[in-house]
């Protein structure tokens, strides 16, 4: 056994530690709960000079998977991590990586797949990977996460296959335990060994084509070879486990059983529930019940023989699934267990129960109840455990709706000047629009000082008539729609980060078509798609698609400068030099190392009728632009409005000061206020002309996330940011002066 030390850590931290000790070349990632801690820890160590792994923040999980693929094709050692819908978004890449035989390791902190949105842990994500040609290990405890990450790379490189290490999100991923890790990185690197792939994209002396087009005969052969590799890997996994046991003192089996030798009733459970069920087994054994529990540490290749040998003496097997294969009479684990045991001639009874969805806790008492079902003569083959039939009240929520008469106060009006190609606004003063009915009710769960409800209410004060909202995932959605309550008094739809504008496009298409067919009355609805929390990173493609189609909607972005709903990781809108959970400050890091993306200019370049930037520090300007955006959305096509949205929790400032902080961002021209109307740029607030122009340091000094930049050692960073802010503003003024 090699020298080891005890650490108090959770599964995510141990996955990151294993990656650091292995010294991967590249990690492509995108933040998603609950796997994000892995990238956060590696970024922190990178800033401290403790690792040189190249971390690449993609704009979405699909691109993160592409980064990993390219890095592996170049012969690098590659690492990734994701969860839930992030895995599904990347799923298209997974067969590419296995079919072209790219070795890599990906950690999956298992989480509920939406919709409806839920960020808690179950196994509905990892089961989508079963048919992708990946080896899949499943770690039931944090210690196994560390150990399996080391063994996974060994298997990946031996068989030229990608490997996933899965474990329970929020249970194994976040619960800290005392665990053993190797004291020396050298021990890990010697165990893994060196790896050189002659056939790689950087070998210019022996060029190869990777990912050729194949006809039916060749693709059949390719998949057969992939099958053979999986079969060979299946025979090698246990020896690798044993070899690692000699090194670490921790021995693993593909199928782990507890008191199963003489058990009459056996539970088959994945992940952390196995540990809980062991306590139930001990309790039942004391009462004379011959109970046992089994877990699988390998899902692919499926360990059929080992499972049969572990369970064959039981009279009843109950398989618990933390997901369902809807309509199939059980989840994937129970379906494969049934097939496996039938193949080997098992004559007992097999029951299937779906449990623990959405992170529902699983206690010892729950395991005892499942064992009780094994003793019931009339127990049904398949059922949901813990679900209840709920009485739905059809009248619920109606008191929250607005009456049609409330929606047209006539406070703001717009008329289009076709000769000058501008929208003229009448009314819309801050005081007058106080009478506008609130589409967002008073109750929400946002942090004190959060700019999202402030900006939404300002936007709505400029928009008269009926409104339909689409929100993608983010703080704005989470804090306003916690089931069974909602803050919205108008129709609202939620969809995923990457396709909010597309979703709204579908709603608009039906609205227009139903009106054309006479299936709904004539009338106007303003459609507002709300983005934020990095949604214009992962969702930019969808936004530009809607812009190219010029669909009649307002795309409203509350730009809070990061992925705030996952705990503040950097986004492409995060300021240069700002620290976040994935842009740490240390001897090798000064914060985010590239400039913020100018989405307003990108949308203007798409040629849509109206683009505007707004800020709560200038409310009258905000309301008038909202009115113009609605007029353009209803009459001409797409309007894009971007607000700088305060986040005191992650900007690390005081809630009561947010208007001043936002005002400073405007006055230093980091966030200039302007509009692009029918292609013509107009600056609507010029701090230079007002004598209020400030250096960027005035804004940076007001937030904890950027205050470190005021130190002398970061003078060049501030200088670069000031030059970029000045360059962008000078370019904007040139556009305004020479339309």
Image (cartoon, rainbow, N blue to C red):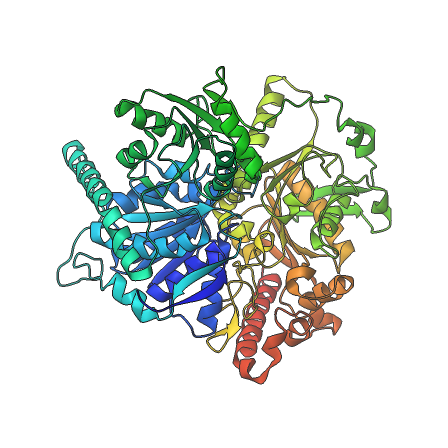
- Placement of the N terminus among the 4 image quadrants: bottom left
Toward the viewer: 290 or 456? 290
Q: Is residue 179 left or right of residue 343?
A: right
Instruction: Give the image location of residue 425, x and y in percent.
Output: 76, 47
Residue 683 visible within the image: no
Residue occupying the far bottom of the picture: 712
Counting the numbered discs, the total is: 0
Toward the viewer: 120 or 447? 120
Toward the viewer: 173 or 207? 173
The image quarter containing residue 268 is top left
Residue 243 visible within the image: yes
Instruction: Give the image location of residue 426, x and y in percent.
Output: 80, 46
Instruction: Give the image location of residue 145, x and y in percent.
Output: 41, 53
Toward the viewer: 652 or 83? 83
Task: Using the image, determine if residue 119 lies above or below residue 643.
Answer: above
Task: Using the image, determine if residue 619 lies above or below residue 306.
Answer: below
Q: Is residue 402 left or right of residue 68?
A: right
Q: Is residue 332 left or right of residue 224?
A: right
Task: Using the image, determine if residue 74 lies above or below residue 60.
Answer: below
Instruction: Give the image location of residue 365, x and y in percent.
Output: 57, 35
- Placement of the C terminus among the 4 image quadrants: bottom right
The image quarter containing residue 130 is top left
Identify the residue at image location x=73%, y=49%: 453
Identify the residue at image location x=53%, y=70%: 591
Q: Is residue 571 left or right of residue 616?
A: left
The image quarter containing residue 462 is top right
Task: Using the image, determine if residue 411 lies above or below residue 373.
Answer: below
């Amino acid at each position: 056994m090699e020298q080891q030390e005890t650490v108090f850590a959770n599964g995510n931290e141990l996955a990151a530690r294993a990656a650091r000790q292995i010294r991967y070349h590249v990690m492509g990632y995108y933040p998603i709960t609950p796997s994000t801690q892995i990238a956060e820890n590696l970024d922190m160590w990178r800033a401290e000079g403790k690792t040189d792994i190249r971390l690449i923040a993609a704009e979405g999980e699909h691109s993160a998977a592409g980064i990993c693929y390219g890095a592996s094709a170049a012969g690098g050692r590659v690492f990734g991590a994701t969860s839930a819908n992030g895995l599904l978004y990347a799923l298209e890449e997974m067969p590419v990586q296995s079919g072209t035989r790219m070795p890599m390791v990906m950690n999956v902190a298992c989480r509920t797949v939406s919709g409806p949105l839920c960020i808690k842990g179950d196994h509905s994500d990892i089961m989508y990977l079963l048919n992708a040609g990946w080896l899949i290990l499943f770690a039931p405890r944090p210690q196994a996460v560390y150990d399996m990450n080391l063994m996974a790379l060994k298997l990946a490189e031996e068989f030229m296959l990608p490997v996933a290490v899965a474990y329970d999100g929020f249970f194994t991923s976040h619960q800290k335990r005392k665990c053993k890790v190797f004291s020396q990185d050298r021990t890990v690197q010697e165990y893994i060994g060196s790896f050189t792939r002659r056939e790689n994209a950087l070998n210019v002396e022996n060029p190869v084509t990777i990912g050729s087009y194949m006809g039916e005969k060749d693709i059949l052969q390719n998949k057969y070879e992939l099958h053979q590799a999986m079969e060979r890997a299946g025979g090698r996994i246990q020896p690798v486990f044993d070899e690692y046991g000699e090194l670490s003192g921790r021995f693993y089996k593909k199928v782990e059983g507890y008191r199963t030798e003489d058990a009459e009733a056996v539970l088959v459970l994945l992940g952390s529930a196995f540990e809980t069920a062991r306590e139930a087994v001990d309790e039942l054994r004391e009462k004379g019940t011959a109970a046992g529990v089994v877990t699988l540490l390998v899902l692919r290749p499926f360990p059929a023989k080992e499972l049969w040998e572990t369970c064959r003496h039981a009279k009843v097997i109950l398989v618990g699934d933390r997901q369902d294969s809807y309509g199939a009479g059980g989840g994937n684990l129970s379906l494969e267990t049934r097939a496996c045991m039938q193949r080997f001639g098992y004559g007992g009874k097999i029951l299937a129960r779906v449990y623990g969805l959405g992170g529902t806790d699983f206690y010892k008492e729950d395991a005892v109840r499942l064992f009780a079902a094994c003793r019931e003569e009339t127990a049904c083959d398949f059922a949901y455990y813990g679900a209840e039939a709920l009485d739905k009240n059809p009248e619920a929520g109606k008191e929250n709706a607005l009456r049609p008469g409330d929606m047209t106060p006539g406070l703001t009006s717009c008329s289009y000047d076709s000769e000058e190609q501008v929208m003229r606004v009448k009314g819309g003063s801050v005081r007058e629009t106080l009478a506008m009915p609130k589409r967002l009710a008073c109750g929400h769960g946002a942090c004190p000082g959060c700019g999202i409800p402030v900006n939404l209410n300002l936007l709505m004060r400029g928009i008269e008539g009926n409104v339909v909202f689409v929100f993608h995932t983010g703080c704005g959605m989470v804090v306003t729609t916690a089931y069974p309550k909602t803050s919205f008094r108008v129709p609202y739809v939620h969809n995923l980060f990457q396709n909010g504008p597309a979703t709204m496009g579908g709603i608009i298409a039906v609205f227009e078509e139903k009106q054309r067919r006479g299936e709904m009355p004539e009338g106007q609805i303003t459609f507002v798609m709300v983005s934020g929390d990095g949604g214009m990173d992962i969702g930019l493609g969808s936004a530009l698609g809607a812009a190219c189609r010029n669909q009649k909607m307002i795309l409203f972005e509350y730009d809070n400068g990061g992925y705030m709903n996952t705990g503040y990781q950097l986004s492409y809108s995060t300021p240069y030099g700002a620290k976040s959970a994935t842009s740490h400050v240390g001897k090798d890091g000064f914060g985010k190392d590239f400039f913020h993306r100018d989405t307003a200019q990108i949308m203007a370049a798409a040629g849509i009728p109206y683009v505007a930037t707004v800020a709560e520090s200038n409310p009258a300007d905000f309301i008038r632009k909202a009115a113009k955006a609605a007029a353009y959305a209803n009459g001409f096509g797409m309007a894009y409005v971007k607000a700088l949205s305060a986040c005191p929790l992650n900007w690390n400032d005081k809630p009561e000061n947010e208007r001043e902080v936002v005002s400073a961002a405007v006055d230093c021209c980091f966030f200039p206020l302007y509009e692009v109307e029918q292609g013509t740029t107009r600056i609507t607030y010029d701090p230079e002309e007002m004598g209020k122009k400030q250096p960027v340091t005035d804004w940076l000094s007001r937030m904890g996330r950027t205050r470190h930049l005021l130190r002398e050692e970061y003078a060049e960073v501030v200088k670069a940011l000031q030059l970029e802010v000045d360059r962008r503003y000078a370019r904007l003024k040139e556009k305004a002066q020479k339309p």
